[in-house]
Amino acid sequence: MFKSYRRLLLTPLALAACSDETTGPSRPTPPRGIVVLHAVGALKGLTVGDTNSAGARVALPPEFDAGGMRLQSDTVLTASSSWGTNKLYVVALPGGAVREVEMPMNANAAGAVLTRGFQGSRVAVALRSTGRVALIAFDAAGMPTTTQLAGVGRCPSDLAMHAGALWVVDYNAACDADYRSLGDSRLIRVTSGAAARDTVALPGVSNASSIMVDGDVAYIASLGVADYSRFPAVTFVSPGAVTVVNLRTRAVLGRVALPAGTNGASLSRGEDGNFYVGAYLNTSFEQGVFRIDPRAMSGNSTASAPLRFLSTQGTPVACSGATADASGRRIYCVLNQGASQTAAVVVFDAATLTEVRRFNTGGTGAVGIALR
């Protein structure tokens, strides 16, 4: 049996700041601050600070187990699975006020997005195990109401808004059982006033897990396939990839695969316009980050070697995720250190990939980083 590895790369997230319908690069000004999500180990939650030091921490429960976050309009969205707290967390920045929304039982929530009124909702959440999407509205007192959309794929994993419609990424696997693949992944379009669904096939794409939208173009990260049937022996069958789709024409424009022998793909858009894609580089689960220029993503190609970050001592730094500022001069990565998974942000010179500074975040097991 083949299935994708379920650690930090399953859920969407480690996403860069984005607006309702675009995740394009910001204007070339210094970032206001940094947000890091921690979901492994003893100190889970968000760290919100400037780009030189850790700031305030927003604590989340010990059972919290999200794989990442979406930072959108100064709001953090992150969802914990049915094996965790089974809740969506909506965190307002910079103050860190938290709203918790209970998800349907055994739904196994994944990606979330601000909808800005789609069918009366404020937030949509992908529910992997039930093949549905939760639409959440808040009343004047802040109390949530949840309705559900069906007909959105076998295993919805992430969502995005475009031109007033909700686009759902279908992982297309038996996510209510053993995560057995049921075929190629796909995109499903849901309009506010119609019951019919539009489907865009993603030929050759296995285990699509997240989506980012820039204008009319969507970038879909897929994990690839790994074989754990003889665990602890593991085989990476196929690598992760980023697939490009024009949502207005429904055309698949191209795909960049990560190199053979790797697996997973956590997608982040730097403010410099590049994508920073985290992956496992080998079956020892060494982590690395690939930088991909979206201007070179037409047709099918393979990403070049991962970025080789170096510490101030000249030793390799194994980042689990990264992003960059709008100037293109600095890359910010998250590093989990030692058995306790103590998390740090390491800042690198983008040209030389050498360390400029680092600081501990005050949390453990970082799974996402974004600039704001």
Image (cartoon, helix red, strand yellow):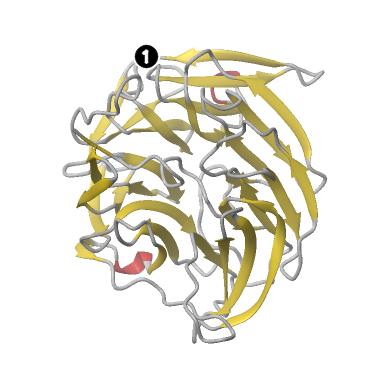
Question: Which amino acid, mark 1?
Answer: Ala
In the displayed structure image, the side of residue 61 where residue 306 appears, left or right: left
Where 11 sits versus 319, above or below?
A: above
Where 94 sits versus 323, above or below?
A: above
**Is residue 270 in sight in this rendering?**
no
Depth check, front residue: 283 or 118: 283
In the displayed structure image, the side of residue 331 where residue 220 appears, left or right: left
Residue found 32% across the figure and 22% down from its top: 197
Residue found 54% across the figure and 83% down from its top: 354
State the image coordinates of residue 338 (x, y, percent, origin top left). Answer: 57, 60
Where 104 sits versus 372, above or below?
A: above
State the image coordinates of residue 308 (x, y, percent, origin top left). Answer: 42, 77
> How many residues crowd mark 1 within 10 Å: few (<14), some (14–19), many (20+)?
few
The N terminus, quarter of image: top left
Residue found 35% across the figure and 47% down from its top: 220
Residue found 59% across the figure and 37% down from its top: 78
In the displayed structure image, the side of residue 60 where residue 179 appears, left or right: left
Q: Secondary structure at mark 1?
A: loop
In the displayed structure image, the side of residue 63 where residue 238 appears, left or right: left
State the image coordinates of residue 201 (x, y, percent, origin top left). Answer: 21, 36
Residue with the mark numbered 1: 195
